[in-house]
Amino acid sequence: MAIQLLSKTKKNTITKLNMTAKHPSESLTILTDLVLPSETNPLNNLFGGELLARMDRAASIAAGRHSRRIGVTASVNHVAFNKSIPLGSVVIIEAKVSRAFKSSMEIYLDVWVEDRQSGNRTKANEAIYTFVAVDDTGRPVDVPPIEPETELEKLRYDAALRRKQLSLVLAGKMNPNEATELKALFTQ
């Protein structure tokens, strides 16, 4: 689906951009790796910082696939270290763009641990990162919108707007009365 976006340039002129909406699956990035001894803490579990770095790389690739631009980390919005990841584990990180705004993209990451014998996967962690697409000079550029397909993609898409509004309200960049998605949670 082609969507027409209006964009203000530096000189305050409005230009029309035609962008085709993309599906989250088009940005899907899967990183698979082993947990090595140098990446573990004294309990022989993967360092949290090591996992964060791997998730950042996966999210960067997903953002680039969606925007076809350089994606830079704007924030790490949420990280849940629900399950430790032991030495020798096969770790799978799945990253997808869950929602796109003007130049920013929310990336949802799921982290799985795969049993080497059975191949069964257990969800260990999840995270939400925000990336901004930039040009070669580092200036933000517009990104295509997202059109979710699956029920999970639709849930994450809707929740992304609530998270963005909450972030803007907490930062003092949005009046709470303007946060329509947040207000809807409490007035139903």
Image (spheres, rainbow, N blue to C red):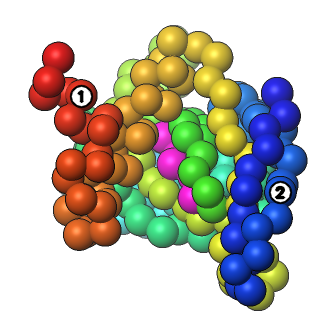
Lateral position of residue 60 relative to residue 65, left or right: left
Report the residue at 64% width, 17% height from top.
Answer: 149
Disc 2 target residue:
16
From the top left corner, tell me how far across and down residue 35 is, in percent.
47, 49
Magenta residues (range)? 104-109
**Nearer the observer, 40 or 143:** 143
Q: Rounded to the nearest whole Å, what is the CA distance between mark 2 and mark 1?
A: 31 Å
Element under label 2?
strand
**Nearer the observer, 29 or 135:** 135
Lateral position of residue 128 relative to residue 44, left or right: right
From the top left corner, tell me how far across and down residue 15 is, in percent.
82, 64
Disc number at residue 184? 1
**Nearer the observer, 11 or 45:** 11
Crowd tier of the residue under label 2, counting other residues whose Cα lies within 10 Å: few below 14, some 14–19, many 20 or above? few
Report the residue at 70% width, 80% height from top.
Answer: 12
Element under label 1?
helix
Report the residue at 21% width, 49% height from top.
Answer: 177
Q: How many marks?
A: 2
Q: Is residue 7 above or below residue 13?
A: above
Disc number at residue 97? none
Crowd tier of the residue under label 1, counting other residues whose Cα lies within 10 Å: few below 14, some 14–19, many 20 or above? few
- Residue 40 seen in the figure: no
Q: Is residue 105 magenta?
A: yes
